[in-house]
Amino acid sequence: MIRYFIPFTLLCATLAFASCGDNEDNDIDVPTEEVVPGTNHNVLVAYFSEPLPDGVDASTSASRVIVNGDLYGSVEYMAIVISEATGADVVRIQTATPYPGNFDDLASQADNERQNDIRPALATEIENFDDYDVLFVGYPIWWYQMPMAMYSFFDEYDFTGKTLIPFSSHGGSGWSGTVDDIAGMEPNATMVDGYSISRNSVAGSADGIREWLGRIGMSEQ
Ligand SMILES: Cc1cc2nc3c(=O)[nH]c(=O)nc-3n(C[C@H](O)[C@H](O)[C@H](O)COP(=O)(O)O)c2cc1C
């Protein structure tokens, strides 16, 4: 944890990045549109989430969320709130080879994948992907970008003509440029204003998520 928490903190303090706050990082600088409220959509929530394994102190890592006694990954919890509020189907993006079960090995594998542009094979297959016109896509920030499994995901699926709504959880880095990365990989998708939140705020985030869904016209299906 120390390996990345200290750099985030130093960056925030030294450079006063606006994106280091909890919830202030939801303005994104790619062309966006609102989804038309009241329209019938086929909606999918696709998310990647790797809650830290048992034995890691949740008070310091804060990467596991406990709500009403149930344990979730941060992005997983956001995905559940979104799917419940919109009636969307939900799918978890998983790699063919699971990630290591301890933080140090996970962090070093993720860093190696990032540095060498390794795009891991996915176990998840969305056979009816073409049926969906609105897709919420969720991921944590890993090493200042999306996990490489998300690059595999965007390689595999073509979002042409679809509405793509990103959501994310982070430990201080905010969006970290990931929305622009997605827009670059999916230039023919319509991007809608997404929602990014610090892992420290996820457990109490349901109302904020529902407000955001209302703002983009996605709270009532
Ligand atoms: C390997 C790894 C790298 C991470 N790198 C960053 C980072 O660069 N910036 C950041 O803000 N948070 C970083 N985090 C923290 C996660 O973004 C944060 O804990 C997130 O809420 C995890 O979501 P999840 O529980 O759904 O996987 C990292 C976490 C892991 C496991």
Image: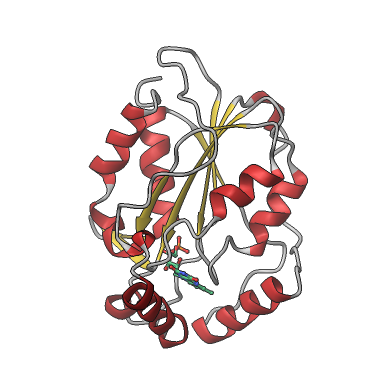
- Residue 191 occupies quadrant: top right
Given residues 110 and 179, the one toward you in this image is 179
Q: How many numbered circles are shown?
A: 0
The residue sitting at 47% across, 86% down in the picture is: 3
Instruction: Where is residue 38? Give x, y as percent.
Output: 41, 12
Q: How was this image coloured?
A: secondary structure
Q: Is residue 133 left or right of residue 192?
A: right
Instruction: Where is residue 4? Give x, y as percent.
Output: 46, 81
- Residue 132 occupies quadrant: top right
Q: Eyeballing the image, is 65 above or below 55?
A: above
Q: Is residue 163 left or right of residue 121?
A: left
Q: Is residue 73 visible?
A: no
Given residues 175 and 123, the one toward you in this image is 175
Q: Is residue 221 left or right of residue 70?
A: right
The residue sitting at 45% across, 53% down in the picture is: 168
Q: Eyeballing the image, is 220 above or below 153?
A: above
- Residue 18 occupies quadrant: bottom left
Instruction: Where is residue 67? Give x, y as percent.
Output: 26, 56
Q: Is residue 33 visible?
A: yes
The residue sitting at 75% across, 63% down in the picture is: 119
Q: Quadrant of the C terminus?
A: top left
The residue sitting at 68% across, 45% down in the picture is: 184
Instruction: Where is residue 163? Give x, y as percent.
Output: 58, 29
Q: Quadrant of the N terminus?
A: bottom left
